[in-house]
Image: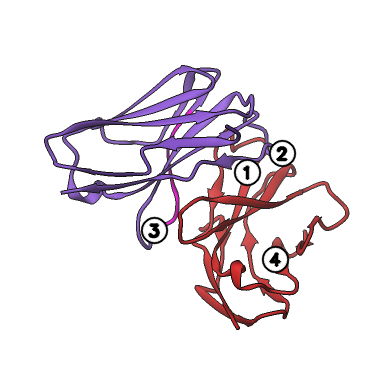
Chain colours: A red, B purple
Amino acid sequence: AQKITQTQPGMFVQEKEAVTLDCTYDTSDQSYGLFWYKQPSSGEMIFLIYQGSYDEQNATEGRYSLNFQKARKSANLVISASQLGDSAMYFCAMREGHTGGFKTIFGAGTRLFVKA
Amino acid sequence: ETGVTQTPRHLVMGMTNKKSLKCEQHLGHNAMYWYKQSAKKPLELMFVYSLEERVENNSVPSRFSPECPNSSHLFLHLHTLQPEDSALYLCASSPGGKDTDTQYFGPGTRLTVL
């Protein structure tokens, strides 16, 4: 079974609107970390936001917020007020506390297109 | 310089060539990673070093040989590669191996094997 599932291969959003990128995960660990990365066409993976499994509040970083629903094992990324520069691939990732060691598991990614 | 740097950014090599990719991190991290990203495939972890010791080796062919001389530098030595090895090679570093440790990536080396 896939550990990280991103069901949206591609998404379109109008500039200045909000968009939600979906991510579900599968783990039996109690302690784990969830991450979102942005990869523009240049190739660099840019860290956006982190959510710990024990964090009670949803993480926020500027225009990025993580909608963490632990019981549903989902960690959706919300981008508010989309900008043209947000067009990129977005990857959800997880590190497991007890079984993962140094491994970060990445999803297949969602390509976001922001329309002017 | 800050963050994670990689050189070269682009590399074209023949199947009989020997080349090396270099990664340097300026974050004071203890762990460094090599990933391979091929078109339409998820990111694949290749090697992990923690405090200069290899801790992960994910069944990578021997034509890829990593080297970590110190906690700031990581190399990937390439020899007799195949065309299917053409990909984006990403280096990353993290403070350690905990689930709370964020990985920070370099800009990548785009490798083409002719």
Q: Position of residue A105 (x, y in %)?
A: 54, 48
Identify the mark at residue A76; answer none if there is no mark. 4
- Asked whether the residues under marks 4 and 3 belong to the same chain, the reply is no
Q: Which residue is mark 2?
A: B100
Identified by mark 1, the residue type is Arg
Question: Given the image, what chain letter belongs to the residue carrying mark 4?
Answer: A
**Compared with residue A28, is residue B77 higher up or lower down, i.e. above or below?**
above
Query: Which contiguous range is marked in magenta?
Result: B41-48
Does the image show residue A71? no
Q: CA distance from mark 4 to mark 3?
A: 21 Å
Q: CA distance from mark 2 to mark 4?
A: 18 Å
- Report crowding for label 4: few under 14, some 14 to 19, many 20 or more residues within 10 A (C-alpha): some
Whichever of callouts 2 and 3 sits on the residue coming sooner in the sequence is: 3
Q: Tell me whether circle 2 and circle 1 mark residues in contact (CB < 8 Å).
A: yes
The secondary structure that dominates the magenta segment is: strand
Identify the mark at residue B41; answer none if there is no mark. 3
In the rendered image, the residue lying farthest to the left is B16
Identify the mark at residue A95; answer none if there is no mark. 1
Question: Given the image, what chain letter belongs to the residue carrying mark 2?
Answer: B
Q: Position of residue B88 (x, y in %)?
A: 37, 49
